[in-house]
């Protein structure tokens, strides 16, 4: 059996002090692959750098719904450019999150739809985030 962590955030600063040990422990437990979810433009480059240095790691890039108000044409152009990187395998995590109420529903839906369109354009799957958004 091949184990893959399909949703991790090992690029976050929380792991700066022990990231190699965390990855080593995961590998010792049988995890062979990682899908690193870079959910904010501020994380995209760090996620790609980490994936380039970590065998078996790929990346999903996107704007989390709680940051949907940051999604504009410039961000979309940067996302389109970076999503062509060979280690980018999905657009995400994207969706709707009405739990925290940090970004209004219309803004979230607009960013969600634009990222779905981008994923279709690039023939990439999406990593979906949904919380209290039935």
Image (cartoon, helix red, strand yellow):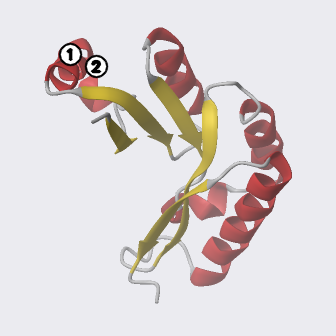
Q: Which quadrant of the figure has residue 17? A: top left
**Residue 8 locus on image (x, y percent):** 35, 40
Rendered-image quadrant of the N terminus: top left
| Quarter of the rendering containing residue 81 | top right
* Left or right for 69, reference 58: right
Within 10 Å of the Cα at label 2, are there few (<14), some (14-19), or many (20+) other Cα atoms?
A: few
Q: Residue furthest top?
A: 53
- Identify the residue at image location x=63%, y=63%: 69
Dot 1 alpha-carbon crowd within 10 angstroms: few under 14, some 14 to 19, many 20 or more: few
Task: Check the image and report above or below for 71 versus 15.
Answer: below
Q: Is residue 54 above or below residue 105?
A: above
Question: Which residue sits at x=77%, y=31%?
Answer: 84
The residue at the point 70 percent across, 56 percent down is 71
The quarter of the displayed image where residue 116 is located: bottom right
Q: Extreme front residue here?
A: 1
- Cβ atoms under marks 1 and 2 closer than 8 Å: no
Tell me, yes or no, if residue 17 can be seen here.
Answer: no
Q: Nearer the viewer, residue 74 or 50?
A: 50
Residues 9 and 67: in front is 9
Closer to the chain start, of discs 1 and 2, is 2
Q: Which residue is drawn at the image coordinates 73% and 31% (left, top)?
A: 82
Q: Which mark is residue 121?
A: none
Let me know if residue 68 appears in the view. yes
Residue at mark 2: 16
Is 84 left, or right, of 65 in this rendering?
right
- Residue 129 in picture, x, y percent from top left: 47, 65
Q: Give the SS element for disc 2.
A: loop
Q: What's the distance in space between the residues labelled 1 and 2, CA to CA?
A: 14 Å
Q: Residue furthest bottom?
A: 134
User: Is 3 positioned to the left or the right of 41 in the image?
Assistant: left
Residue 130 position in % (x across, y down): 45, 73
Q: Which residue is mark 1?
A: 24
């Amino acid at each position: 059996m091949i184990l893959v962590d399909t949703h991790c955030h090992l690029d976050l600063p929380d792991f700066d002090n022990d990231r190699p040990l965390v990855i080593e422990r995961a590998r010792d437990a049988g995890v062979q692959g990682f899908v690193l979810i870079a959910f904010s433009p501020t994380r995209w480059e760090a996620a790609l750098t980490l994936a380039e240095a970590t065998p078996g790691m790929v990346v999903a890039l996107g704007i989390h719904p709680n940051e949907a108000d940051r999604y504009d044409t410039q961000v979309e152009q940067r996302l389109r450019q970076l999503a062509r990187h060979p280690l980018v395998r999905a657009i995400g995590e994207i969706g709707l999150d009405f739990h925290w109420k940090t970004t209004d529903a219309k803004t979230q839906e607009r960013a969600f739809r634009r990222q779905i369109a981008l994923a279709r354009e690039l023939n990439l799957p999406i990593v979906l985030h949904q919380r209290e958004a039935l």
